[in-house]
Image: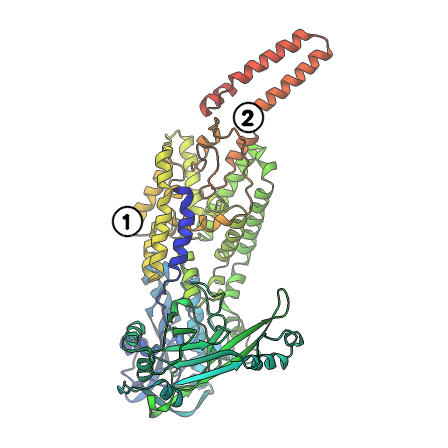
């Protein structure tokens, strides 16, 4: 069972990845209007006005005179934290351009949700009150630093950066403190209403005639002419086969989230099913195709992306995955033709799409022009929803804020430029440049240890000292000093960002974590999970060092029987599967369950937590006193997560003899995590690459196989010497003595050590 477990996990994860995670859409100021406390955000103000501008602000008044305004940081500046989701803060500013109050209204930062009390973050936010943003815009030097809370560096830096950027933009846009405002002229806002289902029955021809269904029809001749006119002459030299009048594709599209269109094209039952799956204001479209060319694509696989078409509105492209797709067999409208393929597609709810504005389906057509080269052309199917299906109501004028994102002040504004014009992740890398260099050197040293391991392990004492020194560096340098402890939360955040909008900026904001993950990803290809779990994990280093101390003081060590041990292995994989599966639906809950890792308590917060977390962490460390690396063996979900991709490793550099396991059990008995099977083979999913078995492999005084070789060689040398001296007695005697010694070697670990000693 254990040998098959990783394969089962891979299949399970592939299936699980097709589940649609509930995306967290970026909220706007209007979402937090009920939480606005005028007195708290702008002291002295009494009332608040209505939303103005785009992005929106709320003006506040005192005795009928505007006293300031309130805005949401994430409306004006990126505030994405390490969780991959915005940190939403309401900010109050007076008319002089000074920050008067802040309120944290929503976030998903795991270190704050679970580890660090939110009160610390709130106390830190008070440092912004009184900052003169107008001076910052004008280039005058003001203090922009905030106190960094240990373990929440990225969160604090994101808050600092987003509040300053948003405040600066608002001050410039609204002309606070005497600045020249950059507001545009007044424009009319509008309210769009999709009309309810009239109950009218429309045939296929009716829907084509009124524009509810739009078409793109291309023949083989059209395609050949298009490639002939393209700038690639090679594409014209390999025309599509068939008659010029043959149908290449007849693609039709309709917006079926519109009641009349959807009910007539899908039928009552399918339309009702669609409505149950659509969120508020979410739209869906129907693509129908005939002809030789498939818009769906023959290479499309489950869990994949449709790569032959995309929806474009206002030059914003929307691509679809299979989780937004449903295959239909027919169109319900009367007299509708049969289609080769029909796709019902839900537009992702976290993207901006206005059904009343024009959009188009862009079809990608490729043509092979060589063994590995292709030429591509695009063709557009234009769509505009008939005006009979919606009504637009003009509302009162509102201020439209200029979308100019420039925050650069005057040319000599060194302070403003250095703070606001440099991306946050670059500032963080510069801030930790020394730690980055040291970590890179450590990774290079570890790589050298592995590449030259055969030379190193032949020197057991040096190997032990090198390993001990590296573990101390990992615990105190990477762990307690730099707080660079990798966690399952990193894995969950990465996968969640793939589903909700991936950006490297999220991960570049933690330089040491990023470098460690880069190193781990590379090492998985060569050595599996052992490079991290055995050498770079601070909590793993703590367990091993504590166990060394326990052995020094002769604390008894317990060996788990193999039959029980191999059945405890799967526990960590099960824990990982459960947490990962939950993360696809609720990242916040998964982050809470990830507290099965004691890393945050021990390494990041150094036991400064509530007593249940401390008791749990201490219990795990205490178990490691008697069972070496207890947590790594049976409970660590991060180790399980790394073991799965570790199956792709290219090299197996850990050497074994044919006698290993049969009968010799020396290495198996001494492996600190019992990663060596009784039959002698090493389980790479469990191996921590401590190199202990390799030092035994080469040891001429411990490994029975090496001892036999040495004694045989000594016997041959003695025999040869006896023959040369014509003293057969000496040669015979020496030979018999060595043969007796060979026969006395016992392959059992304890007896072997006894005889060798």
Q: Which residue is mark 2?
A: 705
* Residue 461: image location, x then y, percent: 55, 32
- Quarter residue 320 falls in: bottom left
Which secondary structure lies at badge 1?
Answer: helix
Local crowd size for mark 1, using a 10 Å CA cut-off: few (<14), some (14–19), many (≥20): few
Q: Position of residue 59 (x, y in %)?
A: 33, 84
Callout 2: few (<14), some (14-19), or many (20+) C-alpha neighbours within 10 Å? many
Tell which circle, 2 or 1, labels the residue nearer the N-terminal end: 1
Q: Residue 409, can we see it?
A: no
**Number of numbered callouts drawn:** 2
Asked whether residue 641 is in view, the answer is: yes
Residue under numbered circle 1 = 612
Residue 83, position in %: x, y? 40, 63
318 relative position to 44: left or right:
right
Give the quarter of the figure containing the N terminus: top left
The one of 433 and 590 positioned closer to us in this rendering: 590
Tell whether 230 sits left or right of 620: right
Alpha carbon distance from label 2 to label 1:
50 Å
Judge by depth and name the residue closer to the eye, 145 or 264. Answer: 264
Q: Is residue 613 above or below residue 44?
A: above
Residue appearing at x 42%, y 80% in the figure? 253
Give the structural element (helix, strand or loop) at label 2: helix
Residue 330 versus residue 735 in the image, above or below: below
């Amino acid at each position: 069972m254990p040998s098959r477990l990783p394969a089962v996990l891979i299949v399970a994860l592939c299936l699980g990845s097709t589940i649609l995670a509930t995306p967290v859409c970026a909220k706007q100021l209007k979402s937090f209007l009920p939480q606005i406390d005028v007195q708290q955000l702008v002291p002295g103000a009494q009332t608040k006005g209505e939303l103005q501008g785009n992005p929106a602000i709320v003006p506040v008044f005192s005795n009928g005179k505007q006293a300031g305004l309130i805005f949401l940081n994430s409306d004006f500046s990126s505030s994405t934290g390490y969780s991959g989701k915005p940190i939403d803060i309401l900010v109050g500013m007076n008319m002089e351009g000074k920050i008067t109050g802040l309120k944290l209204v929503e976030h998903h930062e795991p270190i704050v949700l679970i580890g660090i009390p939110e009160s610390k973050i709130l106390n830190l936010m008070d440092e912004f009150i009184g900052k003169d943003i107008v001076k910052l815009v004008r280039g005058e030097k003001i203090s922009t630093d905030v106190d960094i809370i240990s373990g929440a560096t990225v969160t604090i830096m994101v808050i600092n950066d987003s509040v300053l950027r948003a405040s600066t933009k608002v001050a410039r846009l609204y002309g606070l403190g005497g600045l020249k405002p950059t507001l545009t002229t007044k424009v009319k806002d509008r309210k769009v209403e999709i009309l309810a289902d009239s109950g009218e029955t429309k045939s296929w021809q009716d829907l084509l005639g009124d524009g509810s269904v739009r078409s793109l029809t291309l023949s083989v001749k059209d395609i050949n002419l298009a490639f002939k006119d393209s700038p690639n002459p090679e594409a014209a030299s390999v025309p599509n086969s068939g008659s010029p009048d043959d149908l290449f594709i007849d693609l039709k599209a309709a917006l079926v989230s519109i009641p009349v269109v959807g009910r007539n094209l899908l039928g009552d039952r399918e339309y009702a099913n669609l409505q149950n799956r659509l969120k508020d204001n979410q739209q869906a479209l129907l693509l129908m195709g005939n002809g030789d060319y498939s818009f769906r694509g023959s290479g499309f696989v489950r869990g994949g992306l449709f790569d032959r078409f995309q929806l474009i509105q206002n030059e914003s492209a929307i691509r679809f995955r299979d989780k937004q797709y449903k295959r239909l067999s027919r169109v319900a409208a009367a007299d509708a033709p049969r289609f080769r393929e029909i796709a019902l597609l839900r537009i992702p709810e976290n993207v901006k799409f206005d059904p009343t504005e024009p959009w188009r389906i862009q079809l990608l057509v490729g043509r092979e022009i060589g063994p590995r080269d292709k030429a591509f052309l695009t063709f557009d199917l234009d769509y505009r929803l008939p005006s009979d299906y919606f009504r637009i109501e003009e509302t009162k004028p509102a201020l439209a804020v200029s979308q100019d994102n420039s925050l650069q002040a005057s040319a000599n504004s060194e302070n403003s430029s250095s703070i606001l014009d440099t991306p946050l992740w670059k500032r963080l890398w510069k801030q930790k440049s020394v730690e980055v260099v040291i970590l890179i050197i450590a990774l290079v040293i570890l790589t050298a240890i592995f590449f030259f391991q055969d030379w190193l392990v032949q020197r057991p004492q040096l190997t032990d000292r090198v390993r001990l020194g590296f573990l101390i560096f990992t615990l105190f340098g990477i762990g307690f000093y730099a707080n660079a402890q990798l966690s399952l939360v990193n894995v969950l955040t990465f996968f969640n960002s793939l589903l909700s909008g991936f950006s490297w900026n999220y991960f570049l904001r933690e330089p040491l974590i990023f470098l460690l993950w880069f190193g781990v990803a590379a090492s998985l290809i060569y050595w599996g999970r052992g490079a991290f779990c055995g050498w770079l994990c601070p909590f793993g280093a703590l367990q091993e060092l504590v166990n060394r101390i326990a052995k020094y003081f002769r604390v008894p060590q317990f060996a788990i029987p193999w039959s029980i041990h191999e059945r405890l292995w799967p526990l960590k994989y099960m824990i990982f599967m459960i947490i990962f599966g939950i993360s696809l639906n609720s990242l916040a809950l998964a982050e809470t369950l990830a507290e099965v890792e004691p890393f945050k308590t021990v390494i990041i917060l150094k036991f400064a937590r509530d007593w249940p977390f401390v008791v749990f962490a201490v219990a795990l460390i205490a178990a490691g006193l008697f069972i070496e690396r207890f947590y790594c063996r049976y409970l660590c979900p991060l180790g399980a997560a790394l073991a799965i991709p570790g199956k792709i490793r290219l090299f197996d550099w850990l050497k074994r003899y044919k006698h290993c396991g049969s009968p010799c059990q020396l290495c198996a008995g001494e492996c600190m995590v019992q990663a060596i099977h009784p039959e002698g083979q090493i389980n790479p999913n469990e191996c921590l690459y401590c190199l202990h078995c390799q030092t035994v492999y080469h040891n001429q005084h411990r490994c029975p196989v090496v001892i036999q070789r040495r004694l045989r060689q000594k016997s041959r040398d003695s025999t040869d010497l006896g023959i040369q001296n014509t003293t057969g007695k000496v040669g015979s005697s020496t030979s018999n003595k060595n043969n007796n010694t060979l026969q006395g070697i016992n392959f059992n670990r304890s007896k072997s050590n006894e005889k060798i000693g």
